[in-house]
Amino acid sequence: ARAELVRADLNLSFARITAPIRGRVGAAIIKPGNLVTPNDTLLTTLVSVDPVYVSFEADESVYLDFQAQLTELAIGDEPPRLRVEIGLASDPGFPLKGELDFIDNQLDPTTGTIRGRAVLANPNGLLTPGLFARVRLIGNRERSALLVHEMAILTDQDRKYVYVIGDGNVAARRDIETGGLVDGLRVVTAGLTRADRVVVNGVRRIFFPGMSLVPDMVPMDDPLAGGGGTQVPGGG
């Protein structure tokens, strides 16, 4: 009888549950009076919200570039810290800052991508597990790149292209390859040169290559300045 009493006291002590982590508790699944059994009954869910982890996938070229930077920046056995910028679905940019926390040990052969993870502080609890986020890796290596405004880029099925002003002020098509966004401008990785004059305004009124244009040079980061950019003559 004494052994049964000791066992009952021990089981009663298990009725008080202490969370192993700090976080946010979900809805209570079990209410007072419900029958529960050891190890089989889910009481509620608990998620950690500070810090939070953001998982993402990067393609092979991004992975190789960052591996090269990791090698350059490594000092002894101390791993270098690479910055990450994060934006939510409602954010126009990437206002949240974090660090690269983890890179997987192999690429997925079916997608050609590798999984990574960023960690960032979340003291106000704004970020909740399950949210969609956009991730931008911030490298420590500076490089030159051609940038164009998004409104200059057109799409033809799976190809992207822009119109440039050719000899004699006529429209010429240039198929391009694009990268990420930098301060609202799109990186062009192939298809353009520094000497090309890209049409920004009026591209929807260019119906075919060779069409005559009346160019008005404007800064690429402010395509509405200076009178509106390239114009298409009436009747042309």
Image (cartoon, rainbow, N blue to C red):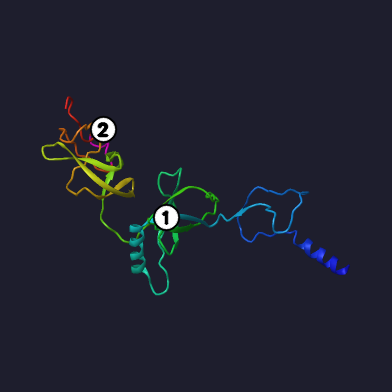
Q: Could you say which is closer to the camera, residue 159 or residue 153?
A: 159
Task: Characterize the magenta stretch by its predominant secondary structure.
Answer: loop
Side of 11 where 213 appears, left or right: left
Residue 2, numbered circle: none
Residue 204, numbered circle: 2
Q: Quadrant of residue 78?
A: bottom left
The residue under the point 26% across, 53% down is 145
Vertically, is 97 above or below 199? below
The kind of residue tagged 2 is Arg
The kind of residue tagged 1 is Glu
Number of dots carrying numbers = 2
Helix, strand or loop at disc 2? helix
Residue 9: x and y in percent read 81, 64
Q: Let me know if residue 225 is in the magenta part.
A: yes
Residue 190: x and y in percent read 24, 50
Vertically, is 187 above or below 104? above
Q: Residue furthest front?
A: 110
The residue under the point 33% across, 48% down is 183
Helix, strand or loop at disc 1? strand
Residue 143: x and y in percent read 27, 58
Q: Could you say which is closer to the camera, residue 199 or residue 61?
A: 61
Q: Let me know if residue 18 is in the magenta part.
A: no
Residue 57, numbered circle: 1
Tell me how far mark 1 sits from mark 2, CA to CA: 35 Å
Query: Which residues, given as a range, are shown in magenta?
Result: 222-226
